Amino acid sequence: MILPGSVKECVQALAEHGAAAKLVAGGTDLLPQLKNHLLKPGVVVDLSGVATLKKLTADKGLRIGAAVTARELERDGRLATGAYRGLAESGALVGSVQVRHLATVGGNICNAAPSADMIPPLLALDAEAVIAGPRGERRVPLRDFITGVRTTVLGADELLVELSVPDPGPHSGGAYLRHTPRRELDIAVVGVGSQVTLANGVCTKARIALAAVAPTPVHARAAERALEGQALTPQRIEEAAKLAVEAARPISDQRGSVEFRRHLVRVLTRRTLTTALARANGGQA
Amino acid sequence: MSTMKTTRDVRGVGLSIPRPDGPEKVTGRVQYVADMTSRGLLHAKLLRSRHAHARIVGIDTTRAKALPGVRAVLTARDIPELKHKAPTRAHAVLAIDRVVFAGQPVAAVAADEAAIAEEALDLIEVQYEVLPAAVDPLKSMQPGAPPVAELGTEADTSEALAHSAVAMAKGEAAPAKAVNISQTAAVKRGDVAKGFAESDLVLEHTYRVPMVHQGYLEPHAVLAEWDRAGNLTLWASTQGSFNTRSEVADVLGIEENRIKVIPVECGGGFGGKIRALCEPITALLARATKRPVRYVMTRREELEAGMPAPQVIIRLKTGVKRDGALMALEAETVLESGAFSGTVLAVSAVFLGSLYRWPAFDIKGSEVLTHKPSVAAYRAPVAPQTIFAIDSHMESLARALALDPVEFRRRHLQKPGEPMVNNQPWASNGAHEVLTRIAEHPLWKEREAWKKSSGNGHGLRGTGLALGGWLGGLQPTSATVKLNPDGTLAVLTGQVDIAGTNIALAQIAATAYGLDIDKVKITTGDTDVAPLTGLSAGSKTIYTVGTAVLQAAQNARQQTLEIAAKELEASVQDLEIVDGKVIVRGVPDKGVTLASIGKKGNLYMSKVEPVLGVAHPAFSQQAPAFAAQLARIEVDPDTGQTTLHDFVVVQDAGHAINPLGVEGQMQGGAVQSLGIALTEALMYDDSGRLMNPSLLDYRTLTAADLPDIETIIVEVPSPSGPYGARGVGEPPIVPAPAALANAIHDATGVRLTEVPLTPERIALAIAAKG
């Protein structure tokens, strides 16, 4: 176990131990994997001493440190407004209260589960991943960050330090919904994060990100394009919801069938778009 | 049972007293087997088959044995006691040359540390020849299915005897080629074909309840140690230490006197800790190493290789007249028993054919083996599954005929004295009373208004109820009650307290003897010191052991009064016990204290006999107990999500010995019943592997999913139970699957015949209906 005090020291530790090292922040994904012998790291690098990773800055957009917890997203007043509400909602849905106090946004992203809750709203906000490594810092759009089930662009000597969210503008609203059979302590059967930005009553930008319906979280591009440049009526939202289903490539497993997941994509896309629209219009929905 | 009247009220029966073990448990101070240690303790781990059905070609343990810290590696070869035709799961300690379910142990390791034992498992090389597996019970019934049991293995019906001795005719022998049908039973009355021909409405559905796990918090665990003389001590988490002793003695082929089972605090059993499971292999590892060995199953092992409840599939066909008269019932029940026989066929037939008054019925039942873990009891075994079928059906019939669903049930509900399917009369019970009581509940009376409030931002709202119960188990038992030298009372049984029964038994002793509860201590002894008793199962602890304690306390009281009568020169009939003193009725200042009687019974040179009340009754009269449950729900028609707004349990306790404890049973049973109804299922893929071997995907409900549960106790005294008490543990797990299916039907118009009633099933059924 290594306990670095800065990002620089983290990078040094990774340079020294390479693929044998595993980073731990909240540990809510890592510990079960260790317990089930899915991972056998030679050394664990504990990020809890790196203060900069825990910062959340809101100034013309957001800068979210990778070790910001789900609970902080859930409770931070700056995320309670329309534009960032989807992000707050995703934080509020992770695990249980106890888990949310530990689980971090960076951990959720780097674990790269298809069902990760905090990824769709960040995708919908066009977030960028800020990565630190031996050659300095690089920035990768979040949509390119995750490459497959539990795989990312991160090299063995790199770590995710921050999520950078561009200013969505004054008339933007976001929403995240997921379906689980249980209310808490469950994993999304389907998750949908939607973000709509308006100008003069017309949608200038629409983003719909789907979780647990493909190996990675995916954008519903056709649905987004069908909304952009349009006034958002219930009919257009319903059409977009139908189009979103086409972006989903779900599998049948113990959590849900292909048929039900496609059904849920439509339902949750419609609902998140409707809520996001109301929030973009300044509603308190 | 005549209840001896004490002349003065004492603090005993009828008081709500919190369980004394509660604070110890919620603060984590209780010592479970996993917390126990012993000098030189070794830790056991089992290597389990990944395949549901395979031939073991070879096992190489060389590398595992060479690992430092490993003290023993056992395979079937090392255990001469093992038999090819294992009559029970307990006898199948390690697979011999064939594995018959994924998760079956093939080798066992004892090592200095658990981590070393686990590492050793990875070093054992097993060569398998994978064979086709019978996974679906309906296919497994067919000729030509891959065989599960060794040819000639007998069906195991001991579970039925333990739970609810309901005599049933054995069915005709299964067709010779259907190798996996291990038991059949059939009952018939009247002319079913004529009944259907004369019916105005014939309804047929197939109901399905999957395998579910009992969900006890503490996994199976045992610590085994042999002494130099060859005597074995087992510290066990068990529902019946004498049963564990018998089973282990039988597997090891040694006398029961050589085994002492010490029942350690049991963190839940619900039927899953009746039969021996990991005790024999742990004892064998301890024998091989000459060291104490502890084995604690992991949650994953529990889910993959515990002893869950059987899958139950019931095809049910009924005919009724337009006016609601019942005409005929035909049913075929399939119980999927997993790799070993051991289910209860009779319960299903009793509830299908004789909860309601069917003039003609034809009921067949089969137990079918599959390549899955063998099953065991789960709180009211097969009753929730059967009531799901018959109560859903009664509701559907009432709705189809536009009859009031409660009135329809009440009209046809059998009364005490009327014949069950086996022609034995229904014993006294409160089925009518609980149904009447729940129908008076405001949530039932206001169900139309609730339904009408659907929409307008709300989901689809509905109300449903169901009636179910349990026939009541019986088993001989015994208890002693002794008077201590200071006038306090000590009760001894061998009964494992898994449900707060010890405090209730002490309350019975207090009232029967005539002494306040705070002067009564109760102890569960080990198998060397306690008098014989049965399982803590079948809702029979208070009914049977309570009777033994009542009789032993009365016996001790009689002895006490006889000693006092001599001293007071009075007749026993004129004596009473008041405030720890035996007095002549009406003369409170003339008396002798219990302490002085107790002391004389233990005094050097004393001629006064010590007071020792003893009772060892056997039983023949069951006391059925019923519960009705009501659910007020709301369904999101798009996602299929069901929200439970209110849940009510009405239950006949006969006489609530400790009302707080009874309510606890009603709450806990309701939660498990709702889990079966809404979320729980062991899911297997086509190769017979469990798809959800963790509590993440095996979904027991959490507090966040549940409303406050309202409990209403009804008391219809049992003529045979202590103070009129009936068993209370099992009835509350029975009705919810049917109650929820009925509520969802009320809300959505969709009738689901397979649980769990998941959002997926509900949403897709609503979408299909359009």
Image (cartoon, coloured by chain):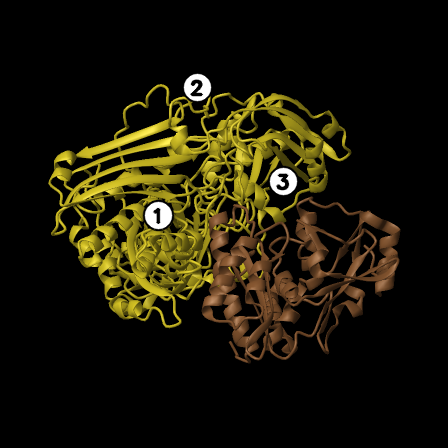
Chain colours: A brown, B yellow
Q: Nearer the viewer, residue A14 or B365?
A: A14
Q: Nearer the viewer, residue A70 or B526?
A: A70
Q: Chain of mark 3?
A: B
Q: Chain of mark 1?
A: B
Q: Mark 3 vs mark 1: same chain?
A: yes
Q: Secondary structure at mark 2?
A: loop
Q: If you read the primary sequence from the N terminus, does the residue marked by circle 2 or circle 3 appear first? A: 2
For mark 1, does the 10 Å Cα neighbourhood hold few (<14), some (14 to 19), or many (20 or more) residues? Answer: many
Q: Which mark is residue A110?
A: none
Q: Depth-wise, is mark 3 or mark 1 nearer the camera?
A: 1
Q: Is residue B397 left or right of residue B644?
A: left
Vertical arrangement, residue A95 with respect to residue B184, above or below: below
Residue B248's x, y, as percent? 51, 32
Q: Is residue B36 left or right of residue B8?
A: right
Q: Which residue type carries mark 2?
A: Leu
Q: At 55% from the left edge and 44% from the top edge, which residue is drawn?
A: B693
| Residue with the mark numbered 2 | B151
Image quadrant assignment for residue B206: top left
Q: Secondary structure at mark 3?
A: strand
Q: At 23% from the left edge and 41% from the top edge, which residue is drawn?
A: B317
Q: If you read the primary sequence from the N terminus, does the residue marked by circle 1 or circle 2 appear first? A: 2
Residue A91's x, y, as percent? 61, 66
| Residue with the mark numbered 3 | B294
Q: Mark 1 vs mark 2: same chain?
A: yes
For mark 2, does the 10 Å Cα neighbourhood hold few (<14), some (14 to 19), or many (20 or more) residues? Answer: few
For mark 3, does the 10 Å Cα neighbourhood hold few (<14), some (14 to 19), or many (20 or more) residues? Answer: many
Q: Depth-wise, is mark 2 or mark 3 nearer the camera?
A: 2
Vertical arrangement, residue A56 with respect to residue B541, above or below: below
| Residue with the mark numbered 1 | B384
